[in-house]
């Protein structure tokens, strides 16, 4: 490639300004979308990739089979770690990792209430620092955790607590947790330079009571266990040993309550893609990555199809130039080179335009882009990706048009014979069908996802949440600042702007706590898993939850040993009716040796306590005066939204009177419902944008093709107008072939979209039904878009004066 070929290519591109712009715009959109997606996928696939001996690291998962359902999660029984340390020798490392929670932290430089509820706190042993490749900036991993009140900080957390103090000077400093717990800093470690499932920022020794626990019955998601193991034979022996041990320790319970429990090992490579195995670390779904990769490939493919279609369609206009070049002695290699030079120049322009488009995508999709993605993306990786994409697109977009140019016949072109063959026209039609098939897949997905989300946001949940505000009550208060939540409730109830106020766990929420209840029958004891909610006496009235039988807590003098249950619990416990359940006694385990009796005093109508992916579960309601009441629900008296500002101002005033150091925050219940489906909303936004981009790229190509068609048929249109053809007939002549291609694309896309959307909807227990209209509307929408796109240039060609179009030979 020399300067002359570049100069000639620039002249040719300038001569065809419209098509040069269409080429650059289509490719820029595809490149920007592809790069934005590639960043996300690359980040997710980097997780845990650089751990030394990653193929030897496993997480111990706890499995159970109960009531016909198998489940698993990352929480394990505490004694399993000490069992492995003391009685087994198959492992190279045994690393327990327990989540820790503190409400408040302060140092000499972090003042009181300056930092609340710090995250990523872990209790572990020194073996953790052998498993995870930290670089020590201060302290020594061999000498830490010799006393209970030590803490090791990552560099980023040390800077947060001690500003710019040198790591060596932080050693020996004291950190106060929850106003009274004093910990001494004994180590500073560098943050990992790669994304990792081990995301701890502060590390503490495991408390003695956890290390010596003998409770084989309880599992907690906060207690995780990792092992490093050398080979598969050792792995099999270890699994056999720990499963034999859990069977021995829980044999009686498994037999009595008819459940099965066991362990399995999860490779570290799979941890990031297994949400149930994680607690606080970021996870993703492989299916989502596949969707993102598919979108990236489609965007590049559609942009390349546009380029190839428009370039080959222009071949008839360039045929004479190619013929003249050949007659003057130009060889095929020189002509091929000119096509590749044009392609590279267009791609360079597209890459330049893609830079601001990428920034636009990133700004508008912050919610789906991991927050720390910029920490793990180097300029070198960006350059390599850009060069690889440039080479790939140059070959894809330049090869076929360049090869086609070598097939141009000198004699035919100089005789002005048409060079477009049926084969090339057929290929263009196939590519157009492919473009609009992809576009309609996205359109159908957009319509169905939007329809399901609308159903989720507006469906009857079984309770009334109109004009309800919810708040989380403050945590981490000192003893002098701690106020009974009922004081806040009483303060609000004094104002006529609020019709009712209730303390208790909100009724539609994915966070849950379940327990086992026991019922004695003539045939023996049976057990049930029941979800729990702690509420006050106003709860059912505020949310208008219907009482089917019995009485509410309001009418009782002592509610501590009474419960209400829902309809599903009536069926689960085997009662014939709601009325039959009244007065019956069930038991709850209060400790390993003690049970308490709970009398059923009422039955309420079922409502959705979790999102629509879950079935309605059996539930028990417990009355609490203070403990476990972490949320407050406020029903506004006036249903008119215009008058709610005054009520919110009153709430803020009362809040600040009681909790002056806590930020006043609130949300309407409708906002909470939307947050329940936040991941689906993000997916919907991604699909919506992909749909818009796909249609835009397809329409750019369609506009270019109809422009070329109009040019190529200018004389034919002029002759037909002189012969009396009507405008509508000429319009159909120019556009009907393209519209038919869109119709064919719709017929291809509909069954494919049905397959994927039907599988997606299976995630929801409560879901919409797919109808033919869902697919017909998508097809009609794409036809209208294609019709509008082709109409712009077709009408312009029809309105041209036939005298002018026939004047020039």
Image (spheres, rainbow, N blue to C red):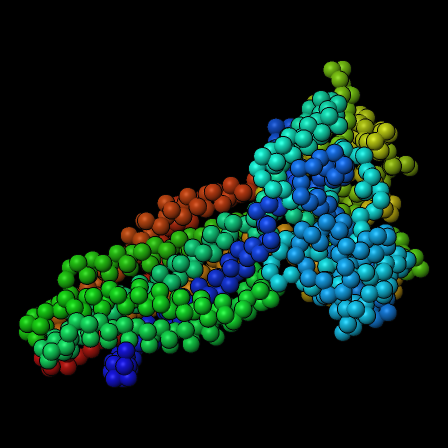
Q: Is residue 608 above or below residue 333?
A: above
Instruction: Tell me if 494 is positioned left or right of 26 in this view.
Output: right
Q: Residue at x 81, y 42 (%)?
A: 210
Q: What quarter of the picture does the N terminus occupy?
A: bottom left
| Name of the residue lying farthest toward the top | 522
- The answer to whether any part of residue 93 appears in the image is yes
The spot of residue 267 in percent (x, y) is 59, 44
**Which one is in front, 603 or 665?**
665
Q: Position of residue 147 (x, y in %)?
A: 86, 52
Whole-percent x, y for residue 686 in the image: 50, 59
Residue at the right extreme, as displayed: 480
The part of the image, by quadrant, that contains residue 327 is bottom left
Q: Is residue 464 left or right of residue 445?
A: right
On screen, 307 above or below 570? below
Task: State whether residue 314 is above or below residue 744.
Answer: below
Residue 329 higher or lower than 556, as above or below:
below
Picture residue at 47% right of the left edge, 59% below the top: 688
Residue at 51%, 59% in the rendered image = 42
Displayed quadrant of residue 51: bottom right
Towards the viewer: 305 or 389 = 389
- The residue shown at (47%, 56%) is 292
Viewer-proximal residue among 668 and 387: 387
Q: Nearer the viewer, residue 645 or 260?
A: 260
The quarter of the picture where the C terminus appears is bottom left
Q: How many marks?
A: 0
Residue 105 in view here: no
Q: Where is residue 658? Give x, y as percent.
A: 88, 62
């Amino acid at each position: 490639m020399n300067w002359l070929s570049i100069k000639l290519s620039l002249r040719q591109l300038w001569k065809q300004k419209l098509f040069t712009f269409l080429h650059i715009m289509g490719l820029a959109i595809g490149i920007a979308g592809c790069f934005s997606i590639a960043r996300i996928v690359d980040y997710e696939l980097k997780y845990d990739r650089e751990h030394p001996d990653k193929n030897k690291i496993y997480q111990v998962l706890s499995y159970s089979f109960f009531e016909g359902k198998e489940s698993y999660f990352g929480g394990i029984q505490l004694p399993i770690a000490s069992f492995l340390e003391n009685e087994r020798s198959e492992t190279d490392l045994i690393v327990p990792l327990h989540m820790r929670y503190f409400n408040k932290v302060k140092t000499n430089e972090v003042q009181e209430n300056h930092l609340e509820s710090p995250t990523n706190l872990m209790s572990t042993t020194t073996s953790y620092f052998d498993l995870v490749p930290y670089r020590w900036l201060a302290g020594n991993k061999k000498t830490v955790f010799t006393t209970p009140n030590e803490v090791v900080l990552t560099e980023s957390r040390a800077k947060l607590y001690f500003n710019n103090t040198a790591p060596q000077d932080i050693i020996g400093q004291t950190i106060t947790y929850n106003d009274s717990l004093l910990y001494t800093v004994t180590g500073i470690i560098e943050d990992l330079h790669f994304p990792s499932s081990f995301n701890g920022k502060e590390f503490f020794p495991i408390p003695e009571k956890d290390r010596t626990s003998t409770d084989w019955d309880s599992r907690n998601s906060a207690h995780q266990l990792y092992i490093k193991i050398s080979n598969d034979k050792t792995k099999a022996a270890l699994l056999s040993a720990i499963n034999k041990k859990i069977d021995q320790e829980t044999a009686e319970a498994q037999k009595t309550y008819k459940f099965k429990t066991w362990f399995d090992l999860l490779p570290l490579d799979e941890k990031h893609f297994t949400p149930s195995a994680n607690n606080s670390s970021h996870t993703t779904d492989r299916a989502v990555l596949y969707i993102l990769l598919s979108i990236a490939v489609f965007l590049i493919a559609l942009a390349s199809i546009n380029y190839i279609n428009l370039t080959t369609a222009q071949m008839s206009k360039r045929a004479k130039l190619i013929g003249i070049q050949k007659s003057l002695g130009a060889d095929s290699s020189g002509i091929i080179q000119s096509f590749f030079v044009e392609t590279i120049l267009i791609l360079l322009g597209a890459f330049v335009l893609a830079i601001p488009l990428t920034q636009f995508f990133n700004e508008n999709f912050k919610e789906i882009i991991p927050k720390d993605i910029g920490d793990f993306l180097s300029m070198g990786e960006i350059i390599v990706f850009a060069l690889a994409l440039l080479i790939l697109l140059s070959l894809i977009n330049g090869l076929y048009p360049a090869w086609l140019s070598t097939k141009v016949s000198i004699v035919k072109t100089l005789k002005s014979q048409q060079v477009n063959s049926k084969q090339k026209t057929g290929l263009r039609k196939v590519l157009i069908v492919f473009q609009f098939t992809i576009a309609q897949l996205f359109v159908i997905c957009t319509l169905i996802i939007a329809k399901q989300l609308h159903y989720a946001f507006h469906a009857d949940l079984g309770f009334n949440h109109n004009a309800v505000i919810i708040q989380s009550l403050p945590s981490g208060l000192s003893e002098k600042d701690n106020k009974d939540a009922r004081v806040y409730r009483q303060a609000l109830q004094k104002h006529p702007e609020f019709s009712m106020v209730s303390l208790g766990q909100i009724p539609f929420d994915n966070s849950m706590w379940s327990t086992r209840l026991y019922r004695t029958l003539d045939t023996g004891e049976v057990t049930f898993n029941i979800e729990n909610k702690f509420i006050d006496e106003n709860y059912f009235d505020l949310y208008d939850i219907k009482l089917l039988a019995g009485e509410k807590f309001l009418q009782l003098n002592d509610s501590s040993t009474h419960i209400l249950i829902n309809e599903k619990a009536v069926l689960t416990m085997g009662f014939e009716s709601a009325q039959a359940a009244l007065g019956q006694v069930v038991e709850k385990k209060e400790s390993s040796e003690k049970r308490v009796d709970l009398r059923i005093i009422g039955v309420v109508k079922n409502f959705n306590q979790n999102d629509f992916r879950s079935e309605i579960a059996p539930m028990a309601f417990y009355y609490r005066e203070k403990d476990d009441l972490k949320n407050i629900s406020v029903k506004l008296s006036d249903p008119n939204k215009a008058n709610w500002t005054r009520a919110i101002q009153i709430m803020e005033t009362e809040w600040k009177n009681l909790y002056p150091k806590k930020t006043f925050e609130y949300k309407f219940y409708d906002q909470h419902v939307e947050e329940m489906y936040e991941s689906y909303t993000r997916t919907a936004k991604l699909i919506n944008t992909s749909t818009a981009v796909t249609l835009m790229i397809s329409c750019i190509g369609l506009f270019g093709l109809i422009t070329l068609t109009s040019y190529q048929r200018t004389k034919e249109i002029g002759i037909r107008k002189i012969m009396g053809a009507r405008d509508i007939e000429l319009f159909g002549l120019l556009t009907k072939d393209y519209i038919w291609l869109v119709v064919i694309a719709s017929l291809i896309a509909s069954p494919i979209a049905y397959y994927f959307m039907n599988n997606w909807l299976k995630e929801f227990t409560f879901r919409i039904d797919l109808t033919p209209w869902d697919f017909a509307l998508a097809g009609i929408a794409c036809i209208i878009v294609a019709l509008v796109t082709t109409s712009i240039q077709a009408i312009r060609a029809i309105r041209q004066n036939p005298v002018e179009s026939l004047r020039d030979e």
